[in-house]
Image (cartoon, rainbow, N blue to C red):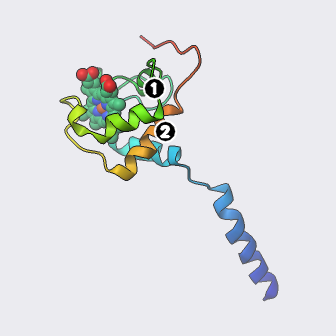
Amino acid sequence: MKKLATLTLIALIATPLSAKVTPAKRGLAFAKTHCAACHGISANSSSPNPEAPPWDDIANRPGTTRETLRVFLRDSHNYPDAMQFTVKRRNIGDLAAYMITLQRKGYHPGI
Ligand code: HEC
């Protein structure tokens, strides 16, 4: 019995460490369900909607930071006509955290 309790305790301690959910991971999960219908959301992907820039293009535009992405997403009045929705505040930080992971030194946009 004591051994079982010890094992349970180890499992409880070990699990959160191995499956740590970061803001970027939450952002990717949110993007898969809310943004991927139009945007290429991973590195070197093309967008299903040709009007929508792939996110690595957006992330690698000169001057783009996590903060500029956050500011853009916070104000849905900025959104292009195709994006008829708002994003909840708690998802915005996650999305910006994810999008900024797509920045690469020497990035060249695809065709
Ligand atoms: C229905 C299609 C559609 C969906 C869904 C969509 N987008 Fe877009 N998005 C577009 C289009 C089209 C553009 C480009 C418009 C333009 O350049 O005029 C765009 C542009 C953008 C831009 C760049 C704006 C700029 O500065 O030029 C960002 C950032 C963005 N989308 C984020 C998101 C996020 C985050 C989501 C999910 C929450 C999302 N989009 C979902 C169609 C979509």
Splitting the image into 4 quarters, where does residue 84 fall? top left
Number of callouts: 2
Query: Residue 42 vs residue 81: left or right?
Result: right
**The disc label shown at residue 59, or none:** 1
Near mark 1 (Cα within 10 A), the count class, few <14, some 14-19 or many ≥20, is: many
Q: Is residue 41 above or below residue 6?
A: above
Tell me the element at label 1.
helix
Q: Residue furthest bottom?
A: 1
Q: Quadrant of the N terminus?
A: bottom right
Let me know if residue 35 appears in the view.
no
Q: Is residue 100 above or below residue 105?
A: below
Q: Which mark is first along the chain, 2 or 1?
A: 1
Quadrant containing ligand 1 reads top left
Q: Position of residue 64 (x, y in %)?
A: 44, 25
Query: Residue 103 vs residue 92: left or right?
Result: right
Q: Position of residue 69 (x, y in %)?
A: 40, 33
**The disc label shown at residue 28, or none:** none
**41 vs 4, nearest the viewer:** 41
Let me know if residue 102 appears in the view.
yes
Mark 1 C-beta closer than 8 Å to ligand 1:
no
Residue at figure coordinates x 18%, y 30% from the top left: 81
Tell me the element at label 2.
helix
Mark 2 lies on residue:
98
